[in-house]
Amino acid sequence: MASGGNCAVTGSDGDHRLSAAIRKQIEQVDRRVMGGGGAYAAEREEIRRASQIVKQLRTQLELAKFLYTLNPGSGKPQLLLGFQSVRCGRVVLKVYGRSRPNEAAVQGFWARASVSVVEVLAAGDNPVSWLLMPMISGFPPDLGDGTALTGALGQIMTTAHAVYSSDVGRRRDLHTGIAGHLGVALAALRRHGYALPDRWESAAQRLYCSGAPTFLHGDLTPNNLLREPSGQLRLLDTCGYTGAAEFDGARWCARVGGSQRAVMLLDTWMRTESSLNARLARTFLGLELLMEAGVRELMKEERRQSWERRDEETRRCLALGARLAGFESADTC
């Protein structure tokens, strides 16, 4: 996990700073959720459950000093807190407000298979999921035009996708993990007057269940990568879905490339992870561009921004996504 902040905070002052950091995260989650019309209303309770277990985990894991918060400010229902550990030195405690058992299981499995991920020192899933990781110096990598970073990430994921064991964790299928979020995103498009492709729901379900199963990261963005001072790139925040390897490349390229560069970046990824099915990867890219179109509109609601005027990038993502996914129609007006 990336390091940051200034100095260790001990005693009552440290407790006050920790409490303030938790309160701020709760406020950010509440603000984002309510701005989005309550689409993720359950996350308000999740962040509160996460906050309730921190004190217990501090004692259990012998986390002596609170250093600083690493919460990114995006209002996710989780806590990222830096501590000085009695046994492990500087560490990051990540606490969810719900069960996400496969993150620790897959991340640990990948580490043992020499995939470039951050090590998991300890983890638990009762009553909620949490991970303890070493604090590693570094920052999210510069994206640039996306080409070099896409190639480097494709190399890491080639190794990750090549290892799989059904005995690791609890199988968390891609459809179970993603379909609900896609529905929320596309519902925002409908609310804002965009026409959606025909039969996208049944097509998405078939696609999510296609391909040879392997472990997926599931949430690749520059913010879920860490560039160490040595230049080494490491993965963070593994979802641990099981599904087709083509999904990871498609999700990354849709997110960082948008309508203008996603196809080109996917070609770069495919040259690196050459064992992938090109047709399946492009179909996944189409579905992920539809997701990106919906997320753009949903974020306007969460940030209380105006959405009445047509967004050109939303339209381009929607049209290109429908074409790549093989849908018959999409918003083009």
Image (spheres, rainbow, N blue to C red):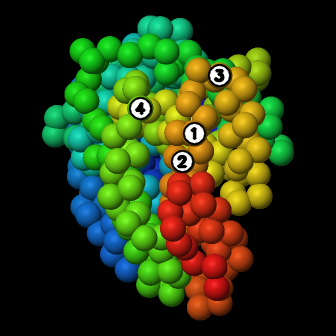
Q: Quadrant of the N terminus?
A: top right
Placement of 331 over or under 294, stated as above or below: below
Distance Cα–Cα, label 2 vs label 4: 12 Å
In the structure shown, which secondary structural element does the residue marked by tag 4 occupy?
Answer: loop
Mark 1 or 3: the one toward you: 1
First in sequence, mark 3 or 4: give its number: 4
In the structure shown, which secondary structural element does the residue marked by tag 3 occupy?
Answer: loop
Mark 2 in CB contact with mark 1 (< 8 angstroms): yes
Mark 1 = which residue?
Answer: 279
Mark 2 = which residue?
Answer: 283
In the structure shown, which secondary structural element does the residue marked by tag 2 occupy?
Answer: helix
Which residue of the protein is positioned furthest toward the right in this rendering? 145
Measured from the top left, where is residue 7 in percent x and y? 60, 36
Q: Residues within 10 Å of mark 1 (few under 14, many from 20)?
A: few
In the structure shown, which secondary structural element does the residue marked by tag 1 occupy?
Answer: helix
Viewer can see residue 101: yes
First in sequence, mark 1 or 4: give its number: 4
Mark 3 = which residue?
Answer: 274
Of the pair 144 and 59, the residue shown nearer to us: 144
Distance Cα–Cα, label 2 vs label 1: 6 Å
Callout 2, which amino acid? Thr
**Residue appearing at x 57%, y 39% in the figure:** 279
Distance Cα–Cα, label 1 vs label 4: 11 Å
Instruction: Give the number of the disc on residue 211.
Output: 4
Relative horizontal placement of residue 315, taking residue 178 as reference (left or right): right
